[in-house]
Image (cartoon, rainbow, N blue to C red):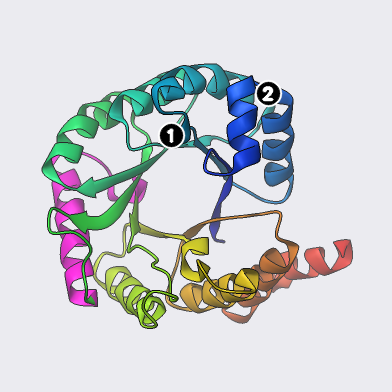
Amino acid sequence: MIIIVGERLNSSRRPVLEAMQKRDMKFLLEDALKQEAAGAHFIDLNAASLLDNEVDTLRWAVPLLQEKLNIPLSIDTPNSRAMEEGLKSHKGRALLNSLTYESKKLESLLPIIKKYRPYVIALCMDEKGLPQTPEEELSIASKIVNFFDREGVNREDIFIDPLVRPVSVDQNSGLLFLESLKKIKRNLPEVKTIAGLSNISFGLPNRRLINRTFLALALKQGLDAAILDPLDKKLLTSLSAAQALLGKDPSLKNYLRLMREK
């Protein structure tokens, strides 16, 4: 079964930003509980838009969300200080979202990873920027995994993200991701793979159609996890059907359960 990271508690969304600014836990908790009920395995929490107030927001929000949720959080920030605060406040193993193969980023996050032992999302990006071929994506993924091997981080705890880019910018973006995903799964079978699904449809009409079609294609190439909106019922239905067709739903239990509920 694919691992779902619920994407909705992101401060780039105006209602979420306003709720965080007002310390409106009722709003945040209701949204998080809906995502959990819809099937999310992690709730992504991003307070980066609050800038200087990000650390305090995570210190406030993480424990309050965990009081009611039965699933862990994905702490989503580029700020190592905010990341440590989020992980320190988290009970159990969180998901660190995310790092890149850039020396400064690795140096700032490695001590935090060793101390708190979160699961880790690692983006296929280095000092040179975004890779342009599946071979380059695999090369960066291999360097990340080898780095963590040396540092004692289990491969099973790593989620490699080949980086979904908008097809509105480059019509070959979807194909690049799918080919990269295929190579990574073939060469690094112990690690998990993940996609920020909605990036693929940025700037296009009927984004949800693009998202759910792309998700089905990515599942065929072995995608293990996706950051998505679990409240998109058509997306979840498409996910269930794709898993049934790919032999990833024993006895079709999940698909049949979903159809009964509908």
Tell me the distance, in whole angstroms, between the alpha carbons under discs 2 and 1.
17 Å
Quarter occupied by the N terminus: bottom right
Query: In the picture, residue 212 is in which quadrant?
Result: bottom right
Residue at the spot 24% in from the left edge and 48% down from the top edge? 100
Query: In the picture, residue 185 is in which quadrant?
Result: bottom left
Q: Is the magenta stretch mostly helix, strand or loop?
A: helix
Residue closer to the observer: 96 or 116: 96
Mark 2 lies on a secondary structure that is helix
- Is residue 252 rendered to the left or right of residue 140? right
- Is residue 59 rendered to the left or right of residue 146? right
Three-letter residue code for mark 1? Ala
Choose mark 2 or mark 1, whichever is in front.
1
Q: Where is mark 1, residue-wise?
A: 48
Magenta-span inclusion, residue 203: no
Residue at the spot 22% in from the left edge and 73% down from the top edge? 132
Q: Residue 25 carries which label?
A: 2
At label 1, counting other C-alpha atoms closer than 10 Å, the crowd grade (few under 14, some 14-19, many 20 or more) is many
Q: In the rendered image, is residue 123 in sight?
A: yes
Residue at the spot 35% in from the left edge and 62% down from the top edge? 163
- Is residue 116 rendered to the left or right of residue 210? left
